[in-house]
Amino acid sequence: MKKKNILLMIIAVLVLISATAAKGKVISHVDRNPLDRIEQFSNALTNHQAKVTSWTVYAREERAAVVSNEEWTQLVKKLKKANSQLNWQPLKTEKQVMGWQGDAQLANGLKTKLSYFAYPSGKGFRTAIAYEADGKSFNRNLWLVQKRDIRRNLDRIFHGQEQIFSCVKADSGVKIKSGLINQGEIYLKLFSAAPIERLDEKTFVSISAYTKTWNDSIISGKKTMNLQVALRQDAGRTVITLGTPIITQEY
């Protein structure tokens, strides 16, 4: 898979394609505890001498109802009022997609973002809402508090049909001598995952895989996947990113 730029670009793509997740269609229900994968990924990376530098929980849900422009305006007002603790600003209109985004830096170390979009559908607009929580490092005691707050926000914002993506990035501090592809396969084994697609370059490797451990997945082409591993060598170090069902950070 190609390197991604910023998460906002991914959100726009996700909003425009109904019931899809980046490169595939979500085909099964999401675990009620997919947030646990942040800790699973962090432990796996730490156990292999990599330092966690960031993690992200991203969730989105598309609303089935078609609304008018006036109804969209009222929905935005309602959302902003219910989340007045966020700093809100309009997003640049592109290809008739309208949007608002609110963000905040919380005392527990979380940086949160809530985005609301409307895009043309027939004579009206379909809407989608996206939530993102970011952390800079992983500390289990702090994570227990952060996970509780994220879960509360997910339950408050969504209607139980959200698609959740978990992603952790780490820095090994050194170049991996055993080869990037070999190291990537080690992480697949940790999660009992079988490789589906791979991109193998001199300084960059991306492997998409499937594990029966989790019950959510996407379809890319005719193949099912729910785990992505990426490794990139840069200036004498190796950056490792783990994501499910796909990576939603720049890597």
Image (cartoon, rainbow, N blue to C red):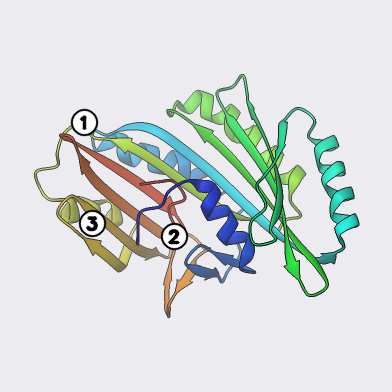
At which x and y percent is residue 229?
33, 53
Mark closest to the chain's N terminus, 3 or 2: 3
> Left or right: where does residue 227 sit relative to residue 151?
left
User: In which quarter of the view is residue 43 placed?
Assistant: top left
At which x and y percent is residue 149?
65, 33
Question: What residue does disc 1 label?
Answer: 173
Q: Residues within 10 Å of mark 3 (few under 14, many from 20)?
A: some
Of badges 2 and 1, the one in the foreground is 1
At which x and y percent is residue 117?
71, 53
Q: Are marks 2 and 1 in contact (CB under 8 Å)?
A: no
Q: Are marks 3 and 1 in contact (CB under 8 Å)?
A: no
Question: What residue does disc 3 label?
Answer: 185
Question: What residue does disc 2 label?
Answer: 213
> Left or right: where does residue 244 sit relative to residue 163?
left
Q: Amino acid at mark 3?
A: Glu
The residue drawn where x is 64% and y is 69% is 18
